Image (cartoon, coloured by chain):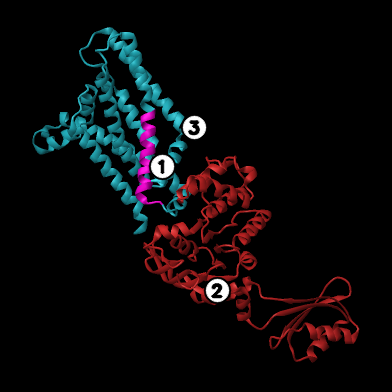
Chain colours: A red, B cyan
Amino acid sequence: MSDGLMIEVANLTKRYAGHTAVSGISFSVERGEIVGLLGSNGAGKSTTMRILSCYMPATSGTVRVAGLDVFKEADEVRRRIGYMPENNPLHPEMRVREYLKFRARLKGLGWRRSRERVDVVLEQCGLTDVSRKIIGHLSKGYRQRVGLADALVHEPELIILDEPTIGLDPLQIRSVRQLIKEMSRNQTVLISTHILPEVEMTCNRVVILYEGKVLAADTPDNLRRLMGNGSLVVAEIAAPRIELQSCWEQHGEIDHFDISVTEGDYYRCALTPSNGTDLRPLIYSLVRERGWGLRELTLKQHSLEDIYVQLIRPRGEEEN
Amino acid sequence: MRAYCTLTRRELASFFVSLNGYVIIAAAVFLMGLSFVVMLYDLQAEATPVPITQLFFSTAFFWLIVLLASPVITMRLFALEKFSGTFETLMTTPVSDLQVVLAKFTAAMVFYLVMWLPLLAYILILRHYTRDAEALDWGLIGGTFLGIALLGGLFMSLGCFASALTRTQIIAAMISFTLGFTLFLLSFLPGHLPLTAGWVGTILSYFALADHMNDFARGLVNTRYVVFYVSLAVFFLFLTLRVVESRRWK
């Protein structure tokens, strides 16, 4: 077993007739991490996941899961992976418990063990109340949980979820996210998504894919740092506009500012630092010094969305 | 083995949890009943030296049932799973392609045989009322059912193959119906072609499904026929397996 690495992908390429879905990507995932595969539609997320879960082989490159080669030791790898494909396909005519038991047996669990495990995952995914219902009659949120329960039922070391929250309402998304977080206590999780806040909320690390290549792979924090200076500070201050303007102009630390009117006597100032420092202490002391009113002082961090757009934009423009 | 049993059971159950299976069986029973009635009328008109089971096989009803039911039974097997995406969840479990193919074939086969069970009732009714054990001895019945089973093996494997080719059930049904019907029509070709002599005729005679069934219904079990059906079924299952594996090199 190789030093705690759960997934090692090296120079992975997958070509379909006519086009290349994934070209030479490499990344690795450590045990116990939640990693998000991020990318727009057609970036190669699903292809990568299908190769990882031994559904189809790569054209070239090596993929190892828990130190095992996904092509040569496919059955052993499949036993260690819980995979939920995109759109979570289920057998709609089966009952929840029956389906999970069927899946557990397929994954090689004994009669007794599968029964025990099904009870555990039913409980874990909050499905106990609907265990006798027909899957086709369940709401989408419940069906998604059935998919998750299926991925968990054989106690895999690695869980691969392809767009687990797609098409759910906000409440259901929250509960699914909660479930994923709970899973990650014992297992390694790889999620793909094109919804950025999802990655920000659930993942320790992000791998950004674009047109079959890895653009960046790091923690959300590091990615933000990579974007570097320019954390914007927003302050709402009650003071005469002219005074505010001259005050910001005097200070060298402030590179750029923007004042807009809000309700009441307050002005909303958006301030960009010149050298990447946090402007909040300075503003606070200024406000106190001059006896102004202050009702908001926030540091706006770059969201992953900004990072994503910035990473992708130059390439998109080159093409045009 | 465990996975094979689990899969077979699920496949078989899926025939019966939906209306699907019942409709097929009802249709088959209806046609069987019709042929039974027709046969009884014929028997009342004049006595015949031909065994009753053979009469049954020579009616259009028997072939109608086999040719129509087989595509409908098998169309779902792979096409539906590919369409709904469950094929992906299935193939990412530690189950081999061969197990999947065999399980689906077995389930279709068992369903096909269950569909034919009512025929046994007709035979027994006839036996009861004619009080003539000679007319329907167990050899005849056994031969008949062996023939039905062998024919089923061929048509089910052919259906599996057709279903594996596509993700649309209707297309799967059309493919297997066309293949099956062509195979059936081959039996009549020698009578209509001038080149029945020579090797073409010899080869075509191997495919004379209708003749085979007549022999089986007479209680005549020809090993050559058995080998023919089993090997053709294995051949089509092999093709199915190759199609299922094809996702690896596509």
Helix or strand or loop: what does disc 1 sit on?
Answer: helix
Q: Amino acid at mark 3?
A: Leu
In front: label 3 or label 2: 3
Report which residue position mark 1 lands on: B5
Badges 1 and 3, same chain: yes
Q: Is residue A164 above or below residue A288?
A: above
In front: label 1 or label 3: 1
| Mark 3 vs 2: CB contact within 8 A | no
Magenta stretch contains residue A158: no
Between residues B187 and B73, which one lies in front from this camera angle?
B73
Give the crowd class for mark 2: few <14, some 14-19, many >=20 residues within 10 Å: some
Task: Give the residues in magenta.
Answer: B95-114
Report which residue position mark 2 lands on: A312
* Most distant residue in the front direction: A112
Report which residue position mark 3 lands on: B19
Helix or strand or loop: what does disc 3 sit on?
Answer: helix
Chain to which the residue tagged by mark 3 belongs: B
Going from N to C along the chain, the mark reached first, 1 or 3, is 1
Give the crowd class for mark 1: few <14, some 14-19, many >=20 residues within 10 Å: some
Residue B215 on image: x %, y %: 20, 25
Chain to which the residue tagged by mark 1 belongs: B
Q: Main secondary structure of the magenta part?
A: helix
**Residue at the image point whose x is 38% and y is 28% from the top:** B115
* Most distant residue in the left direction: B198
Q: Is residue A251 above or below residue A292?
A: below
Is residue B17 at least partly visible in the picture? yes
Give the crowd class for mark 3: few <14, some 14-19, many >=20 residues within 10 Å: few
